[in-house]
Amino acid sequence: MPVPTLELRSVTKQFTVTGRPAFLAVDDVTITAHRGEFLVLVGPSGSGKSTLLDLVAGLTTPTSGEILLDGAPVTGPGLDRGIVFQQYALLPWRTARGNIEFGLEAKGVGRRERRTIADEYLELVGLVGFGDRFPHELSGGMKQRVAIARSLAYDPDILLMDEPFAALDAQTRENLQDELLRIWRTTGKTILFITHGIDEAIYLGNRVAVLTERPGRIKEIFDIDIDRDAVDDLRSSERFRDYRHRIWLSLRPEAQQRAVAGDVVGTVAHV
């Protein structure tokens, strides 16, 4: 069998704070993502989704277990992983093209080649003509396109996306979901996508992994078998509604636990 692009083996993360009990964020998470797969993690707020992404990114280390990328242990950050955050994280003093070139500079790519590659990715994300614009001159959706292009330009093995569309309005979010699917099909990249939205998870993912309430554990994994090109309005299709219902039922006990604890359920209940 081919080696998975990403493999988490019994990963646990516990945080310790002086004078307080240890805080268990994620517990015994085992999951793989194969080359070219679009894997989505969905769960209620506080279920450890972002913690898992930070672990895969190498921004923090697991308390126990291991994370492998193309069969090699993850020991820290690296250019083999591209990261797209919710808040864009663009350098305000660089143009859109300059932001895309940032990772290429770290790889030692020459100036002329950097510009060529950056322009290719500006075209890929639909921003031809905006390369010389600074972040403050771009809309939120355009900034996120630049962030996606920047993460793809240095050719990482996997793209990590932490609720990248959460801060956008509904129409822009849906448009960018379509754009992301187009980019994924064009590049064939492996994507690990974090969300709390059930609809977004189904619309984008090959597989959707449901996380429990804290500490986060993999509760159930759904293979999303939908022909996205076969219907005009995928979200209204019977098959889409069936997946939504099944994933909601999987998440529902977690939402009920939050309600009992007096927490807000809306992050999963609104979809």
Image (cartoon, rainbow, N blue to C red):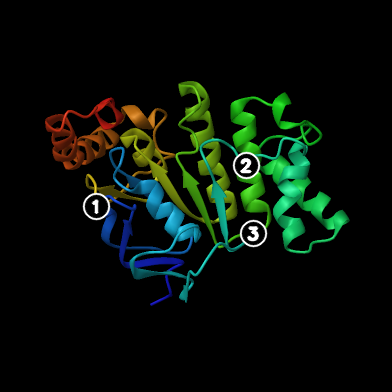
Q: Which mark is residue 261?
A: none
In the picture provided, is 12 more to the left or to the right than 136? left
> For the C terminus, which image quadrant?
top left
Could you tell which of marks 3 and 1 lies nearer the N-terminus? 1
Give the distance between the C-alpha atoms of the residues marked 3 and 1, in whole angstroms. 41 Å
Could you tell which of marks 2 and 3 lies nearer the N-terminus? 2
Q: Is residue 270 above or below residue 147?
A: above
In the picture provided, is 239 more to the left or to the right than 156? left
Q: Which mark is in front, 1 or 2? A: 1
- Mark 3 crowdedness (10 Å alpha carbons): few <14, some 14-19, many ≥20: some
In the picture provided, is 66 more to the left or to the right than 91? left
Could you tell which of marks 1 and 2 lies nearer the N-terminus? 1
- Read off the residue under disc 2: 147
Q: Amino acid at mark 1?
A: Pro
At 43% from the left and 53% from the top, the residue drawn is 53
Q: Amino acid at mark 2?
A: Ala
Q: Position of residue 92 (x, y in %)?
A: 72, 35
Q: Position of residue 135 (x, y in %)?
A: 70, 31
Q: Secondary structure at mark 2?
A: helix
Q: Secondary structure at mark 1?
A: loop
Choose between 54 and 98: the one closer to the eye. 54
Q: Is residue 199 above or below residue 34?
A: above
CB under 8 Å between discs 1 and 2: no
Give the distance between the C-alpha atoms of the residues marked 1 and 2, in whole angstroms. 37 Å
Q: Position of residue 33 (x, y in %)?
A: 40, 61
View extreme (right): residue = 112
At 15% from the left and 30% from the top, the residue drawn is 259
Q: Which mark is in front, 2 or 3? A: 2
Q: Which mark is in front, 3 or 1? A: 1
- Read off the residue under disc 1: 21
